[in-house]
Image (tube, rainbow, N blue to C red):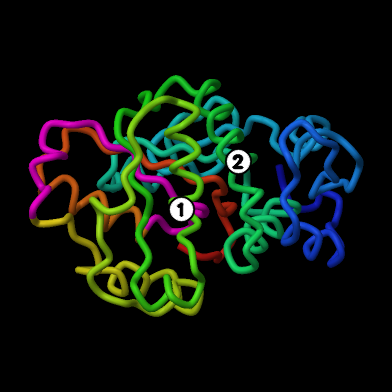
Amino acid sequence: MHAADAAPVDSSSLSDATTAPPRRGWPSLCAVCRGWGRMRVCDACRARFARPTPRCDRCAIDVPAGVTRCGACALDPPPFDAALAAVPYAPPWDHLVAAFKFHEALELAAPFADLLIGAHAATAHVSAPSLLLPVPLGAARMRERGYNQAWEIARRLGRRLRVPADPSLLLRVRETPHQLALAPGRRAANVRGAFALDPLRVAEVRGRAVTVVDDVMTTGATLGEIARVLRQAGAARIDVWAVARTPRDDDGAN
């Protein structure tokens, strides 16, 4: 799906997405269409805006129908084994991800986890997770934001899928500028050496399949650096799950 296919989301929808999470089972305004329903993103909007999209099995970039791997990954595959993305980073999802990430719209974590579970069910090349690790925030950004959006998604995935999710095994050991502020070619250098495993727990990933969870994947630099850390520690397989993936010609965030 391209941005032109999506209906715009007005600013009142964004402010509404940041207030009063609905009680389970009670009517709620859909964060996309603002119609009444029982979920924060209604079934009709999921069907309209989260349609299955052909994606590269290594990096989850959009590809033409019938293609399983993009040219970039055929020539230089990323350090992780497979990638899963639920939706494109385009309207309405880009607005909702921003509200979730920067404006405390934590009630969107459950719908985002549901989107990932649905995408995984429709994807054959991505293994079922056995250990979920969120992309960690640095201490300064955690103090500033008050929560790690990747952990909010990962812990709900763990609950739904009944697999362990761990917020403290993977660490960010160096603060880095926002990837959004950098040109794509500088992002790998920006995050190099920024992540590590808890030195007392390195053995916990040895020989295991690990799934790394984030909200948005752009160039894959952050997820690739984390995959290198996990591979050096002996992880047997590394999958990455991101709610949204930037389109091929976009210049987004991670």
Numbered disc total = 2
Q: Which residue occupies 16% across, 38% down? A: 235
Residue 80: image x %, image y %? Answer: 29, 43
Residue 12: image x %, image y %? Answer: 87, 64
Q: Could you say whether the residue bearing mark 1 is in a helix, strand or loop?
A: helix
Check disc 2 and report the residue beneath it: 110
Amino acid bearing label 2: Ala
Amino acid bearing label 1: Ala
Screen quadrant of the N terminus: top right
Write down the region rendered in magenta. Answer: 200-220
Q: Which residue occupies 51% across, 52% down? A: 215
Screen quadrant of the C terminus: bottom left
Q: Is residue 213 magenta?
A: yes
Residue 197: image x %, image y %? Answer: 17, 55
Instruction: Look at the picture and state if 102 lies above or below 54.
Output: below
- Left or right relative to 224: residue 143: right
Instruction: Look at the picture and state if 104 lies above or below 181.
Output: above
For residue 232, which numbered disc appears in the image?
Answer: none
For residue 150, which numbered disc appears in the image?
Answer: 1
Q: Which residue occupies 38% across, 65% down? A: 137
Residue 44: image x %, image y %? Answer: 83, 31
Asked whether 151 or 25 is in front, the reply is 25
Q: Could you say whether the residue bearing mark 2 is in a helix, strand or loop?
A: helix
In which quarter of the view is residue 45 placed? top right
- Left or right relative to 172: residue 71: right
Asked whether 145 or 194 is in front, the reply is 145
Q: Is residue 134 magenta?
A: no
- Left or right relative to 81: residue 109: right
In which quarter of the view is residue 182 placed? bottom left
